[in-house]
Structure formats: structure tokens, C-alpha cells
Image (spheres, rainbow, N blue to C red):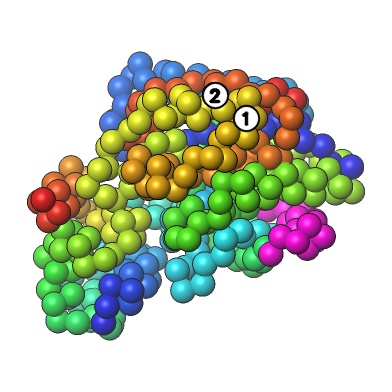
Amino acid sequence: MSARNLNLTLVDLCRSEADIEQYHKDPEAALASYNVTDEERERLVAKDMGWLYTYGIHPYILVQFALAVGVEIPHYVQQLKEATA
Amino acid sequence: MAEIVAAMSSVHSPLMMSTPQMADEATWGRINNGFNTLRENFTSAGADTIVVISDEHFNALHPRSYPSFGVVTAETGVGPVENWLNVPCDSISVNFEPELAEAVLNEGVRQDFDLTRIGEARLEHGFLTCLNFMTPQWDMSYLWLIQNCVLAPLPSLKRCYDFGRMVGQAIRSWDSPRRIAILGTGGLSHAVGTPDMGKVDQQFDKKFLDLLCQQDPAMFDITDVELDAIGNGTHEIRNWIAVAGAVEGAKGEVVMYEEALVVGFGMMQFQL
């Protein structure tokens, strides 16, 4: 996997209302049908936006994923600032 | 023939729908006044169709296959795609204008524009947010033209102006009695999804609005490096520039501008 592929995966995930709903209850289960690496899965489950940003996820894709899974913008920005400091 | 009776642009900050509480009552008063001004302009001109020139944010289109200039040719569209807009997904349905879409595609070929036919597109905030306030009943016909403002390399500002000019000519050549309002959405200065989110450049915005309203070609000298430094969302001024191209020669006026809802929050309209 790579950031290029994970970008495509996150777009698919965000378009699935059912998967996003499941993500709120059980993120591991929501990601089960998607082809992601172990590290990517770990960071996605942890909602580690700083790591995902530096990994190369497109900002538009990342922030909408964050909003979809319940990360509030101030917390999102703080994570990015800490990751890029 | 169809006639362009109104041309305007506005920001499309999704926070207007998702988290309106981020702006206070006084700010909302000014925002609503702005939308009322734009709406009054096109309704008093008898507009029955709105052509929206916007980008989209990987909700309607997929990065697996991404056009520079897309024409939605579907008969209808539903949305929003986003589950965080505070409106149930796919609860909004609009009638598109496929005949006008074909007219734009054909004019594009005549003018050596390589346009992409988009046969189906779900609606997302680039299309929805301004219209949510201006045509909340969704009772007009719409055409959605999508410019790439999000996935580099982006079309140049001049190319977007020329695209708009071509669209204007397509509309005026369309054998139809329709009265068309053109709406550009997006911008102004803002950063999306980056550590700079929340940063706005009022000086740039005011300079850009002045150039736009005067149809000053100096606006094409704004570089992508400059736009990147201001904030990646600022690339959406391409949509405002395309509207200017559609009504080439017309001068504009700023309807409102202030910093609000995480963007340089502006609206303008051309005097036709």
C-alpha cells in the first residue's frame, strides 16, 4: 500500500454511509473489507491525522475523512501542527 | 436563443451548513443579506436556470479519473454525499439541464476545449451550499460544470477564463428561450485540511476582487505558487474567473466581504 492507494481507499470509504456508520462503532470492522497495510490500519483506527497527513494523504480527502469519523476541526489542526512542527 | 441574465460568484464554505454556529448572529445577518441580494438580482431578471461553475472535493468525482473541465450531462442529481453537512445524505434532488450540457460539449469541441462528459454525479458542497440558501426549494433547472481546483496540475487561471467565455458563447448559441444565471462558487482565500486551516488573506482577497470586478487581465498573473502560499482552497478563484469569462466585458461589484466561517467570505455580481 502507499499514500496514493490509501487516498483512493479513503475516498471509497467516505462514500459508504454504512461503512462510516460502522466506523463509529467498530473501526476495525469497518476497515476489514479495504486493502490497507497493518500500519495504515493502526493509524486509521487511532484517527492519527498527523501521521496520515505526513504520509501523503491529500488534505481534502483527509479532512473530510476526519469530519466523517467525528474528529473536530480544532483537534484535527492541532494534530497536523504537532506532526509537522 | 438563451440569454445570460445574471452572473455572480460566492464562497461555498460547507460550514454554512455543517456548523453554522461558528458565525454569530450579526455575521449571519450580513451573509443572508448577501444571498438575498444575489437572489433578488437573478429572480428579478427572470432566471429559470442556474449554471453552477464550481470545483468538487472528491465527493462527486473520484481521483481514479479526474477531469480538468467536466460537464454533468445527467438529467437529475441527488446529494449530499457528505454525511457531515447536517443534511441527510441524498435528501436533496435537483433537475439538471442535459440539453444545455450537450450545447456546452459541442461548443467546447468547436473551440478546441477537451471537455469531459460526466454522465452521473452525486451532489456535494461545491454545488449545494450557496443554492441551499438561494434556491432552498431546489425548484429551478441546473447545469453543473466542474473545474479541477483540487488535484494538481490545475488548469491555468487564463484557461479557466477562456472556459467561461466558451460556456457563455454556448449558452447564447443555445436555441432555447431559457434565461440563465451563472453562479461561480468557492474561494476566496482559505486553507483546507492543512495545518494552516483557518488562515485567511484579506489583502489578497480584496486585490483579487478589484481585478475581477474590473475584468483586469492582471488577475491571470496570480501564480499557483502564490495561491499555494495563501492556502490551497484559494485555487477555487478559478470558478469566479470562469464566470467573468462568461460575461466578458461586464463590470462587477462586491456584494459583501469579510472573514467568516474559516474563509475570506465574499460574494460579487456582474452588472449586465
Could you tell me which chain the residue with mark 1 belongs to? B
Displayed quadrant of residue B161 = top right
Viewport quadrant of the C terminus of chain B: top right
Q: Decide: is B37 above or below B150.
A: above
Residue B266, placed above or below residue B62: above
10 Å neighbourhood of mark 2: few (<14), some, or many (≥20)? some
Amino acid bearing label 1 = Asp
Residue at 77 percent across and 36 percent down: it is: B4
* Camera-side residue of B66 and B31: B66
| Subunit that carries the residue with mark 2 | B
Vertical side of B24 occupied by B54: above or below? below
Does B196 sit left or right of B185 as displayed? left
* Residue linked to disc 1: B216
Left or right of A49 in this view: B46: right
Q: Secondary structure at mark 1?
A: loop
Q: Is residue B106 magenta?
A: yes
Label 1 with label 2: CB-CB less than 8 Å: yes
Specify which label sits upstream in the sequence, 1 or 2.
2
Q: Tell me how far mark 1 sits from mark 2, CA to CA.
A: 8 Å
Task: Identify residue type, mark 2.
Answer: Asp
The structure residue drawn at horizontal position 63% and vertical position 24%, both measured from the top left corner, is B214
- Left or right: residue B6 versus residue A1 is right
Question: Residue A53, image x and y in percent?
Answer: 22, 60
In the image, is B84 to the left or to the right of B222? left
Dominant secondary structure of the residues highlighted in magenta in the image: helix
Label 2: which residue? B210
Q: Residue at 86% of width from left, 47% of height from top? A: B173
Range of magenta residues: B96-114
Judge whether residue B133 can be spotted in this image. Answer: no
The x and y percentages for residue B7 are 67, 32
Numbered disc in front, either 1 or 2:
1
